[in-house]
Image (cartoon, coloured by chain):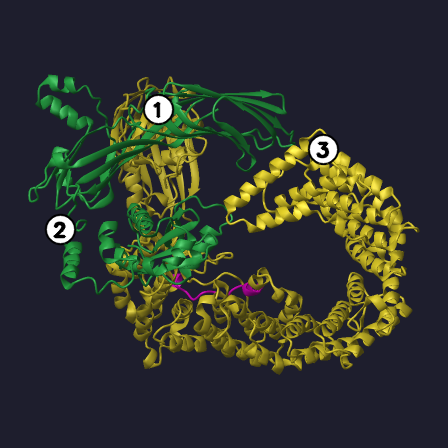
Amino acid sequence: MPAVSKGDGMRGLAVFISDIRNCKSKEAEIKRINKELANIRSKFKGDKALDGYSKKKYVCKLLFIFLLGHDIDFGHMEAVNLLSSNKYTEKQIGYLFISVLVNSNSELIRLINNAIKNDLSSRNPTFMCLALHCIANVGSREMAEAFAGEIPRILVAGDTMDSVKQSAALCLLRLYKTSPDLVLMGEWTSRVVHLLNDQHMGVVTAAISLITCLSQKNPDEFKTCVSLAVSRLSRIVSSASTDLQDYTYYFVPAPWLSCKLLRLLQCYPPPEDGAVKGRLVECLETILNKAQEPPKSKKVQHSNAKNAILFEAISLIIHYDSEPNLLVRACNQLGQFLQHRETNLRYLALESMCTLASSEFSHEAVKTHIETVINALKTERDVSVRQRAADLLYAMCDRSNAKQIVAEMLSYLETADYSIREEMVLKVAILAEKYAVDYSWYVDTILNLIRIAGDYVSEEVWYRVIQIVINRDDVQGYAAKTVFEALQAPACHENMVKVGGYILGEFGNLIAGDPRSSPLVQFNLLHSKFHLCSVPTRALLLSAYIKFINLFPETKSTIQEVLRSDSQIRNSDVELQQRAVEYLKLSSIASTDVLATVLEEMPPFPERESSILAKLKKKKGPGAVSVNELEEGKREGGELNGGGGERGGDNSTIAASNASTPSPSADLLGLRTGPQVSAAPPSAGSLLVDVFSEAGVNDDGFLSSAPPSAVSEDAAPPLPESNELLNKFVCKNNGVLFENQLLQIGIKSEYRQNLGRMYLFYGNKTSVQFVTFTTTVSCPGELHPQLNVQAKPVEPLIEGGAQVQQVINIECLGDFCEAPLLNIKFRYGGALQNLSLKLPVTINKFFQPTEMASHDFFQRWKQLSQPQQEAQKIFKASHAMDTEVIKAKLLGLGMALLENVDPNPENFVCAGVIQTKAQQVGSLLRLEPNAQAQMYRLTLRSSKDTVSKRLCELLAEQF
Amino acid sequence: MIGGLFIYNHKGEVLISRVYRDDIGRNAVDAFRVNVIHARQQVRSPVTNIARTSFFHVKRSNIWLAAVTKQNVNAAMVFEFLYKMCDVMTAYFGKISEENIKNNFVLIYELLDEILDFGYPQNSETGALKTFITQQGIKGQHQTKEEQSQITSQVTGQIGWRREGIKYRRNELFLDVLESVNLLMSPQGQVLSAHVSGRVVMKSYLSGMPECKFGMNDKIVIDKQGKGGTTDDAGKSGKQSIAIDDCTFHQCVRLSKFDSERSISFIPPDGEYELMRYRTTKDIILPFRVIPLVREVGRTKLEVKVVIKSNFKPSLLAQKIEVRIPTPLNTSGVQVICMKGKAKYKASENAIVWKIKRMAGMKESQISAEIELLPTNDKKKWARPPISMNFEVPFAPSGLKVRYLKVFESKLNYSDHDVIKWVRYIGRSGIYETRC
């Protein structure tokens, strides 16, 4: 390459740069630059053409100004002009300017591309190189589009110079990285691969970078490169240090090329061809052998180059994972490095060993270095090296050395760096669980962990302890004893309080026999920590207290006292307050049986993958490398594990789910709760409704809120349950007709002969007023001629909490079956509410009771003997067969209950006349209960067949 | 309160470092250098907060003065102190430059000890300071005990700014009204904003402890007199009065008297000091009018014509007139023609600078320039910065007039008539800009 000759050394540029360097302040610098820019502008503006030298000089100055951080918005044209110069220096400056300052200006790009094309097709290698460098430096998509086809041709052409080939290979690599879709090798593939055989080492080095990148994307196309690479590698490895002349670096032959070759081989599985494989194994052995040889030079560069090749070879060995012999040798080699005085080497050795540990062949070999690694963990100065040591310990751990490793890691944790503590905690937790032979050891380890590094113990870790303790009966007593002891420390971590609260709440009874840990002592111990804890922990402790009430009735009064105190029952935190109130009520109202059911011991957790492992997987880092191995280990250790499942942590879930109150506590700890297990039988749930009676009024089943369809302007269809409502009012005249969250409708009615009057009371249950409140009563279909209903208008506005009354007058014209419809519309907070109900007006309301003697009754009974006049129904009793209740119901029906008429005293007979405007319909009734079969037979006779039928239908629902 | 005070040169090297409080660590010095002086973007705010520490800085030529505090101080007070500090240093050794500061660093530390005590500003009156902080080497022998105790009593006494027993053969005083007028005008000649900030600077050489009273055409005072006396009196005087928006006084002025009677009475310090500062925004006399005319001829040429008109009494002469016409960033050549003065294209400042030595009132002058542009591929349009102007006129653009300055000295035998008084008005341009 022709160097810049002395005569070319632009003096103006040097002066300008030294001026700027001498500027005292930023302002002065800006002034100088402004002056220079004006000068250049006037020069470029000048109509007389500038010669190449001054053009180059000014473009250089612009470049310098740009690199100082100022905007340059002219001079591009001049730079492009320089490209077409025949002088190397001018062309070089032009390309430099373009590479640094090019922006996607369409016309300029065209000019630049043209110039580059010219240079590429010229036979001058330096110009070709400049053009290729420019393409690689810009590397834009436009460049790729223009030249992606051209460059491979240059790369493989027989007459291209070696230096150009190198540039072309690297340029192509750059273009491939930016826009892989445009670089299509296709026909060139095999010729590119054969560049590995090139005489020139530089070309091979450049080409191998390109091939590595390409073969990562489509390995099959470049498969042939494996054997070529192996032969090339063996040639280099077997060569003497002097053979390669320029490419020998501190007595190591072609170290960069060797590394790249080894890395390329890592893209492929071991070669199938025996000969190739043999040659490769030979190479690797040679590399390992060379590592044992005494160094040829004391220079650090020599050992660096040698070790680079060695580590690349070891990663190839690990990648193949099929040569036990090589693996063990590699392991031994790394073992030597573990004690090397070079920190970087120790780091690399630990890192590589981490991956070696996961290979079945070398696992045992790695384990022999345990002492060294533990030592490294303790004594290394550099935190990143210690981190690697911890990773390696984790990876090499198995059942035989678990106790030792866990103990070491625990003791290291006390002094570990904050940055790696959480990861260490997770690792200890996993190892302790995975290789636990004896669960008391596991419990000890984890409690120790919480004690030492409580802040870094994540939720998952302590959930896991609880899951395991709950699933393993044999360890529960020990766990309770241990946490009790741990809690006695004057200052203990909140996570410890959580575990303690949970475990004592569940299994405190197991240690209650000992007077030193009597129930009251346990409670006082827990409660002494209460005030130091955060809200979630306090909530957990409250749940533990209620469990105590169940476990130890003697603590009840003390705990109730605590729950009753203002700091609990009036706590500003809603969750705590709710728990305090609910638990207090539960403990004072529910019987011991109920308590025992509700607060039963938690059922075992379902088996699931350990949540901690999932957490560690989420954490990036080298820990993840050995996850596969870890899972294997997990399987082998699986039979030991009590159970899995992420659910857990809070025994309050059980109370909350059973209490059937809308409590948010089900997920209050943010636990990722699994399927909730409702441990108590459903009967307990229904009993509890009474406990929480103030909340349970409108929840007991027969009333519901307005259906979702109730928003249209038309009258909504009657509620599905309105028939039931109707039946409810057959035998009574007053009561609550309807209730939902917004509205309550009360009813009061009185009837005389064929007339009736009904009072409806609309109560607004909310604190917001209802507007445009309207009600309409209609008699649908054939009811219209039978019944005359008149509703007085009602106030359109109901204030929050207020009640309005509506009077409805009813006249019965003829006998009827259907009930009139009541439609209510109003707006609540902007939303239209629309609901329809059946008014409880039934034919029996118009009964006039008739007293008659036995004789008269049977006479009339016989008179009404036509088949259509009689309606009979036999049905099963739906309520208890209580004589008094039945009597009351029959009286409520409106007929006269005739005593001593029927020969069988068990039977009931009634008589009455239905008063309608058109006619009077006499009716007789006979109800025969059968106590053994729990059945009734109901017979009705009346002068009108429809009446008998309707009455029979209505009455059948009542008993 | 101020925790510390640092002085840096333009490179950010510390020249003076004085820490008054423990909460300011050594690293505060570096923090300011890194975050302000060497900041990649120019820091324009005079107050910078770095790690809960506040830095207040002013720049005098190439020198940075920074006051540091961790407390919530009155920023105006800190800046006032920094300005005072600059004044004091100027009074002691002239221009504030790196050289001067290096040469006088002992003196500066001495001054800092005196004017700041545990971060609380103390007496920063140059006159008073000069009595006991001197530059003439060791003078202790010359000062008698009496003198020393006198200095002590003066500095700690009620009138700390003047010592007793001053005697002059000629009782003389000089009064300068210095104003700077600021303007922003639209191309059509509409005033967008204008205000005058002025100072009354006094140099007094009076014997004894004279009681002075200063009177000017303050609108409130004139109106009050007009109401109190006959209407003829105000009419006869015929003087215009000015409305002062706000004013501040030297500590010698009796503020209680100003509040009650709006009269300015004081016992003056000896030598030069600033009596008051004020600001007006109404009825400002704009000494010059700039009429720009910019025409773009194609993409490569720009024609600029600027006319300036002087707008004051023909008998007065304006001086040091300089008009600065910004040029586009892609200017490649400029031709200028002007009738009066000299005009030149300064590439380093991207502007045409037109200088006129003198110009009488009610005159007009013109410049025309042809600017050649280099076509660029940048689509950004030129922002057209305003044309700015500098000048000096011998009157007060606010219209302020000194009505009287009376001197009473009861103990010594000279009266108001014996005092020789000089009054001078100087109006300068502040930021005087016209958009084009």
Q: Report the residue marked by disc 3.
A: A106
How many discs mark residues in the rendered view?
3
Task: Tell me if I can see residue A750 in this picture.
Answer: no
Query: Where is B125 relative to A36, above or below?
Result: below
Q: Residue at x 6, y 44 (%)?
A: B411
Label 3 chain ID: A
**Mark 1 on the same chain as mark 2:** yes
What stretch of residues is rendered in magenta? Answer: A597-613
Residue B286, which numbered label? 1
- Other residues around mark 1 within 10 Å, as few (<14) / some (14–19) / many (≥20): many
Residue lying at the far front in this picture: please name it: B169
Amino acid, disc 1: Leu
Residue lying at the far right in this picture: please name it: A158
* A337, A793: nearer the viewer: A337
**Position of A699 compared to A260: left or right?**
left
- Chain the render paints green: B
Helix, strand or loop at mark 3: helix
Q: Colour of chain A?
A: yellow
Label 2 chain ID: B
Query: Where is B197 relative to A547, above or below?
Result: above
**Mark 3 on the same chain as mark 1:** no
Cα gap from disc 2 to disc 3, whole angstroms: 85 Å
Label 1 chain ID: B
Amino acid, disc 3: Ser
**Which quadrant of the view contains residue B392?**
top left
Cα gap from disc 1 to disc 2, whole angstroms: 45 Å
Secondary structure, magenta segment, majority class: loop
In the rendered image, residue A332, in percent from the top left (x then y), is placed at 72, 80
Q: Is residue A514 magenta?
A: no
